[in-house]
Amino acid sequence: MPHPDDETLAAGTVIAEHVAAGRDVHILLLTRGERSVVLEALNGGPAVGWWGVRHDPAVEGYEPLTEADFGAARYRELVAAVGCMGVPADKIHEAGLPNEGVTINSAKAAIVATANQIGGDVGLWAPSHTVDNHTDHLAAGRAVRQLGTDDPVRWWDRRYYVLPMYWSDARLSQVDWWWDTPNNADVAARARNAVRAYQGWSPRTGSYAIGWQSTYAPFRTIEQTPKSMVHR
Ligand SMILES: [Zn+2]
């Protein structure tokens, strides 16, 4: 995952189903998403849409956040969310790449290093290499596609997920996509609970609802109808 929230927005159903099927699911976080307008908003900058008013750290009871504080808070949201989906924190791996600075090569190196550490036959999931606009997402998707070209035997199992903001994108005609819908109520509840983990507001204990403040519309989509759009 390039940033905390990608896994819940794009792959919550996929992850919860894999866990339910007894598979060993790991999350590789490429960046902590530390560059965001929400950091400025939390520090008293212009209001973001979902919150609707300016934050005032002094009144709301927290110190202004540095980029590192903000990244750590986003990481905590990710830990909470993947926990809802059944993945414990010790299965989260971090590449420590810069937000908005992921390259195909740096993503490939991080994926290979993590797969070597996990060992065995590792299947790869990444954001779409075609149906996305964010450079970090595209780099991650293209890294997985290139690994498949470099060594199709080792990396035989590669799939991609499409974020909800691209579910009507014209580029979908270029990929052979399908819906992965929750196969039972338990999976749906887990995918939904992960969404809620990104909404927690408790600044004195380090929860800042960063996910929802940064992009609430796709969270609402998944909360209403948990599902994932995937392609090979
Ligand atoms: Zn992302």
Image: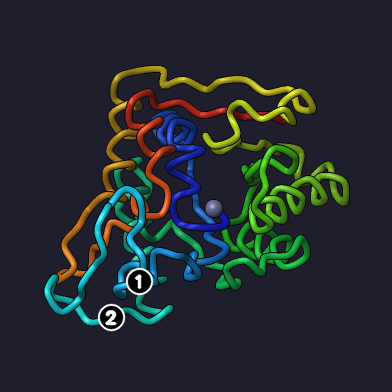
Residue 135 is drawn in which quadrant? bottom right
**Is 119 left or right of 80, judged from the image as shown?**
right
Q: Residue 146: give its label.
A: none
Horizontal and vertical percent position of residue 107: 69, 62
Secondary structure under tag 2 reads loop
Three-letter amino acid code at the position of disc 2: Pro
Label located before the other in sequence (1 or 2): 1
Question: 69 or 215: nearer the eye?
Answer: 215
Q: In this view, does 228 lie above or below 131?
A: above
Residue 79 is drawn in which quadrant? bottom left
**Is 157 left or right of 56, judged from the image as shown?**
right
Three-letter amino acid code at the position of disc 1: Gly
Q: Which residue is drawn at 50% across and 37% down?
A: 11
Horizontal and vertical percent position of residue 231: 68, 29
Q: Residue 64: give its label.
A: 2
Ligand 1: does it lie within 8 Å of the C-beta at label 1? no
Q: Is residue 229 above or below residue 157?
A: above
Question: 69 or 115: nearer the eye?
Answer: 69
Q: Would you say the residues marked 1 and 2 are in contact, meaning their CB atoms lie under 8 Å apart? A: no
**Is 81 left or right of 133, judged from the image as shown?**
left
Q: Is residue 217 above or below residue 34?
A: above
Secondary structure under tag 1 reads loop
Residue 190 is drawn in which quadrant? top left
Q: Give the alpha-carbon distance from disc 1 to disc 2, as whole Å.
A: 11 Å
Question: 52 or 153: nearer the eye?
Answer: 52
Horizontal and vertical percent position of residue 128: 68, 40
Q: Is residue 227 above or below residue 116?
A: above
10 Å neighbourhood of mark 1: few (<14), some, or many (≥20)? some
Horizontal and vertical percent position of residue 202: 16, 62
Q: Residue 45: give its label.
A: 1
Total numbered labels: 2
